[in-house]
Amino acid sequence: MTSPRKTWAFSSMRPKTRLSLDEGENYFRRRLFSSFRSDRRERRSEEEDDTDKRRTLSDTDIETNKGVFLPGEDQSDMGAMKRFSTLFSSFRGKVSKDRTDKEPDLPASTELSSVEEKAKEQRYASGQFFFEYLVVVRPKKTKDGIYEPQIIYQFPKKDGMVRFQKEEEEKTLKALTLFCFPEGVNWAPLTEYSSETFSFVLTDVDGMRKNGYCRRLLPDGKGARLPEAYCIISNLACFGLFSKIFDEVEQRRKFSMAMIYPFMQSLRESAFPAPGHTVNIKSFIPERGTEIISLTRPTDSWLEHVDFRTLFKCLSDEEVLQVFAAAVLERRIIFIADELGTLSQVIHAVTVLLYPFIWQHTLISIVPEILIDVVMAPTPYLLGVQKSLADQATDQTELLVVDLSEGRKETFIKSMGDEDTILPHKLKDEIKQALSTKNENSSLEELNRVVPEAFLPFFIKTVGHFAKYIVRGEFQRTNFCKTIESKNTRRFVKKFVQTQMFDLFVQEMEQRPASQDGTGFFDKKIAEYYKKMREKAKKH
């Protein structure tokens, strides 16, 4: 059964993919929430007095009386996008109104005193907590005979909030069910269901970015039963670490829902480890007794939210390069797959390939059925759509549609036709050559080394000379492009410098204090490259 098409808007959903090893989380939060159009030069004089606001959260990302505007769009530019101007303000309000009487009572849990809870909330706000919520979502049969996903468990259950805070929390949690079960109402009891883990990134109406991690599985039991989704909401992006947490939650759920609470309580009270460090959680589980669970954060924090294995399992090196080329020019890209995990992992991997640049437009790794009309947006996007909704997502023009499913007849269902010619041929061949060192059995650690080493030099060789053309805080765009000797490379760079990701990158470089010049990860890689080039020239 296919539900009737509805038109909803959406909030900006962006990946946390600022790949800096030297700068803190606040730095890439500023970049993630800044959004500017390519005509910023015309408005520059108006913006100079508003630097702080611009570097934290642009006006176009803040809730208006109508809702949230798309990232990078001014109110005057909405046009055809007017009906997409709200997700969590209009949609969550509708969900709240329609479902108020259907929400099940949540299990009672031990609550902290108001003073302790306030102190812990301050810790969470500072980014020291692992997560904000754990919720368990399950489809429940309604009076209409359809199955509607509802929250059956929440930890922690917050008290002491004022009315509007409580209302916003309820709306957020109810809207969250969409992403746990994006298929909508098309559910029925099952006897077999393969567990899957996936993630999404969203920005709420107040501008707060959150990461959602979900594991969907069929609970233990006999006969036909409904699947459950465990969803953790966190400010932190670390897919591998949260996957391990889900393993522990799943083990405890086999005994009872009550077994989850003490483990999550211990976890929530623990400080999130620094890159390369480990946090130990003491927890009890029947049949195993009290044990120490070690959670180690990867050393390379900028790669901890990505798994390249899925990307290169689904696509050949040539196909990955064509997707990369389309993303670099900020085109509309839709990925199609059966598995939710495949969609989220591939989209996050593609955004990481863009380092040191950040995708500044709409990103929804898993589009819920009720929001499928988002594919009609005329602005750039990266969208993940389930195979069952492919027909509704592929009737658009001027976009790239990538089929990731096994047994597909063709990978590119739709394309612009020039994806294989966007990148300069010589540099494209160099990426291919670097990627050839991997194989089907390459480990995650090997791919995390090989893939960045293949793609990062591309940006070093095309735009790595940017610093020389920032004169007195102003980027000399024309001279920057003219200095490129290769015609193919110059042709590509002229297009690339018009993108929003490059525009924002340059703005930050213009505003960066002189004391920080050359200190970033990308800066160091550029310096290493030019040093090698000078040494090579001396030998010849």
Image (tube, helix red, strand yellow):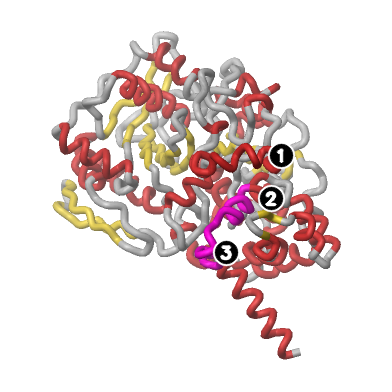
Front in this rendered view, residue 193 or 473: 473
Q: Position of residue 296 (x, y in %)?
A: 33, 60
Front in this rendered view, residue 97 or 67: 67
Q: Which numbered tag is attached to residue 101?
A: none
Q: Which residues are magenta?
A: 504-521
Given the current orientation, which residue lies at the most extreme bottom position?
539
- Residue holding disc 1: 42
SS majority, magenta: helix
Position of the C terminus by quadrant: bottom right
Is 157 placed above or below 286 here? above
- The residues bearing labels 2 and 3 have C-alpha atoms spaced at a distance of 17 Å
Q: Amino acid at mark 3?
A: Phe
Front in this rendered view, residue 48 or 133: 48
Circle 3 or circle 1, nearest the eye = 1
Position of the N terminus by quadrant: top right
Q: Position of residue 345 (x, y in %)?
A: 53, 48
Assign a secondary structure to mark 1.
helix
Q: Amino acid at mark 2?
A: Val
Left or right: 299, with 417 as reference point: left
Front in this rendered view, residue 37 or 341: 37
Q: Residues within 10 Å of mark 2 (few under 14, many from 20)?
A: many
Q: Residues within 10 Å of mark 1 (few under 14, many from 20)?
A: few
- Total number of numbered discs in the rendering: 3
Residue at 62% across / 63% down in the picture? 456
Left or right: 172, with 320 as reference point: left
Assign a secondary structure to mark 3.
helix
- Residue holding disc 2: 328
N-terminal of the pair, mark 3 or mark 1, is 1
Q: Which numbered tag is attached to residue 522?
A: 3
Given the current orientation, which residue lies at the most extreme top position?
143
| Magenta stretch encompasses residue 410 | no
Given the current orientation, which residue lies at the most extreme right position?
487
